[in-house]
Image: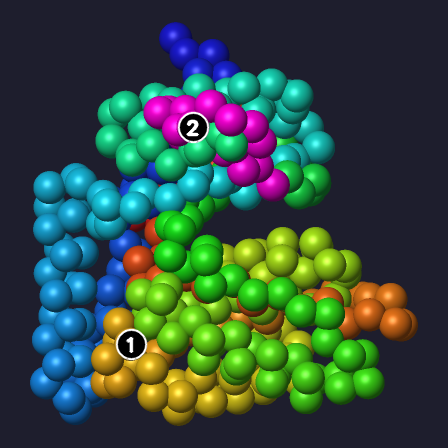
Amino acid sequence: MKNLENIVEDTAVELLKRAANILQNDYVAALSEARQKTRGEIGRSELSNILKNIELAKETSQPICQDTGVVAFMLKLGDNFPIRSKLRKILENATRKATNEIPLRPNAVDLFRGNTKDNVGRHVPLIYIELVEGDDLEITALPKGGGSSNVAAHSMVTPGLGWKGIKQFVLESTARAGSLGCPPYFLGVGVGGGEDYCMFLAKKALLKPFGVRNEDPKVAKIEEELLEKINSLGIGVMGLGEGPTALDLHIEIAARHPASLPVGVVFSCWAFRHAKGRVSKEGKVVFEYA
């Protein structure tokens, strides 16, 4: 019988496999709808190629993209979940196992030793931990490719510009990204906190439910406005000028220093790869995404 540490490790491996090989159904539906609405033949053809790629990856249980990303885990750790300090070691073991079994391309590069060959290195996999009430451990696997990470953006916006400055920065960042991150994009925008925390907020925003607007109606309105303006930039599918530039955008906000207005923008390419699961303290596992 497996102990809880083995169960957490196996769950993390399975989540990495699902994230790498299977795009969520609502994203696939959105891409299919975009293909129907796209007028240009080139844009429709590219969306057809994307959809065929998704289908083949799922059928053959192979990664959607050859760049399987830097491995990251977003954790929600319940007060009463019995494993705590051992989680890093468990998730490192899971990453090594997933690299060999799925397989994942080795993407962890040490500045002195070169590629580690197993996706584990200093501070990698990336692990973000949020302490929550309850008995469970929620794990979200988020292997993020280099292309979309390279176009991430950060700015300390002049506080007096407020939301006008925030919107301008998001639009300028998307325009600069252009085709480099393989659109149509998913965007997460983090506002406030600090120069580092706004980027974490942006990554959290990226993981919000698809198509669901912010609980604050004022923020929800800004999400809709930005998504509309981004899609009017004309970047289009793979930068070809046809079809959608972005499929969704979410904003997460925090309080800030009066003299600072940190803003972070995190992009995902069309292959927004992530998978979520929950492990109870008794060892029961529930996977949220197919």
> 10 Å neighbourhood of mark 2: few (<14), some, or many (≥20)?
few
Question: Mark 1 = which residue?
Answer: 239
**Residue type at numbered disc 2:** Gly
The prevailing secondary structure element of the residues shown in magenta is: loop
How far from the left and from the top, in percent, is residue 35?
Answer: 18, 79
Question: Mark 2 = which residue?
Answer: 114
Task: Report the span colored magenta.
Answer: 112-128
Name the residue: 39% across, 8% down: 1
Name the residue: 16% across, 64% down: 51
Magenta region includes residue 156:
no
* Mark found first going from the N terminus, 2 or 1: 2
Front-most of residues 288 and 221: 221
How far from the left and from the top, in percent, is residue 112?
Answer: 51, 26
- Look at the numbered discs 2 and 1 and tell me whether their residues touch, using CB distance below 8 Å: no
Name the residue: 47% across, 63% down: 151
Report helix, strand or loop for mark 2: strand
Q: Is residue 258 visible?
A: yes
